[in-house]
Amino acid sequence: MYKLSPEIVKPGCTLKRLIEYRKETGLFSGDVDSYVQKILDAMAQGTSQQHYVQASDGRIVLAKNEPLPGGGWVSTHEDVTEQRHAEQERAAIRDQEQRRANIDSAIASFRPTVEKLLSTVSASATAMRSTARTLFGSSEQTSQRAESAVQAFHEASTNVETAAVTADELSRSISEISRQLIHTTNIVGLATSEARATDDEIGGLADGVRRRSGMWSN
């Protein structure tokens, strides 16, 4: 079973030497002394012992140690590779079925919550679509008002520019009128001065004529 040499494994071979040989051939990977001492202590206490041994070639061996009433013990080793693999497969299947049952149970308990959330989300989506339509309508109205405001602004700007041009022309007209009034005033003043001078001259001539007339009368 362990492919051990009959030259070493024979009557008189100690347990320690057997385990050391198994370790030399790669069939044992633990600590030899602690393994041997564990078996000896169990047999001294009359305690049965069994454990699985993983062979280097992949086989699984079940080792059983049974103490004897008169001392010593009987150790049996059974190749349980197929049995062990079958047990592992059944355990894996059971674990898989248990996980599947847990998942199904979780889904069953989670489904009402999901349906409620979906219903809430659907209602919220409907409300959001309605809100979006309202906002879109408000946006169109706002855009129209903005366009009207921009147009009015342009019109106001045009009117302001026109008023500015008109005011400038009016200011120039007033300046021209003022200039003409000043010029007219100057002409009138000059004419007035000339008229006064002429009147003075006429008055002087009249006085001279009156004086001369008096002289002639005397």
Image (cartoon, rainbow, N blue to C red):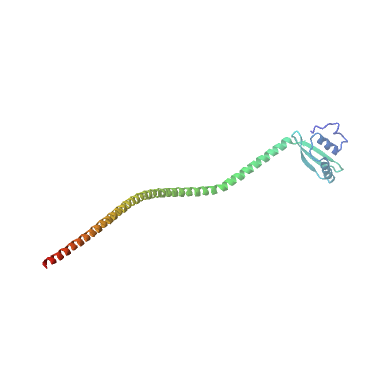
Could you say which quadrant of the image residue 179 lies in?
bottom left
Residue 183 locus on image (x, y percent)? 27, 55
Q: Residue at x 48, y 49 (%)?
A: 124
In depth, the one of 87 and 167 nearer the eye is 167
Q: Residue furthest right?
A: 12
Say whether residue 166 is left or right of residue 218.
Answer: right
Q: Position of residue 96 (x, y in %)?
A: 64, 41
Of 200 and 168, nearer the camera is: 200
Q: Is residue 9 left or right of residue 59?
A: right
Locate residue 141, reporting x and y percent: 39, 49
Q: What residue is drawn where x is 60% and y is 44%?
A: 103
Rendering quarter of residue 195: bottom left
- Position of the C terminus, as image quadrant, is bottom left
- Of the 4 image quadrants, the one containing the N terminus is top right
Residue name at image x 57 percent, y 45 percent: 107
Asked if residue 28 is positioned above or below residue 192 in the image, the reply reads above
Q: Residue at x 78, y 41 (%)?
A: 50
> Nearest the camera: 177 or 10?
177
Q: Position of residue 170 (x, y in %)?
A: 30, 53
Q: Is residue 122 left or right of residue 58?
A: left
Q: Nearer the viewer, residue 51 or 68?
A: 51
Pick out the residue farthest to the left: 217
Q: How many marks?
A: 0
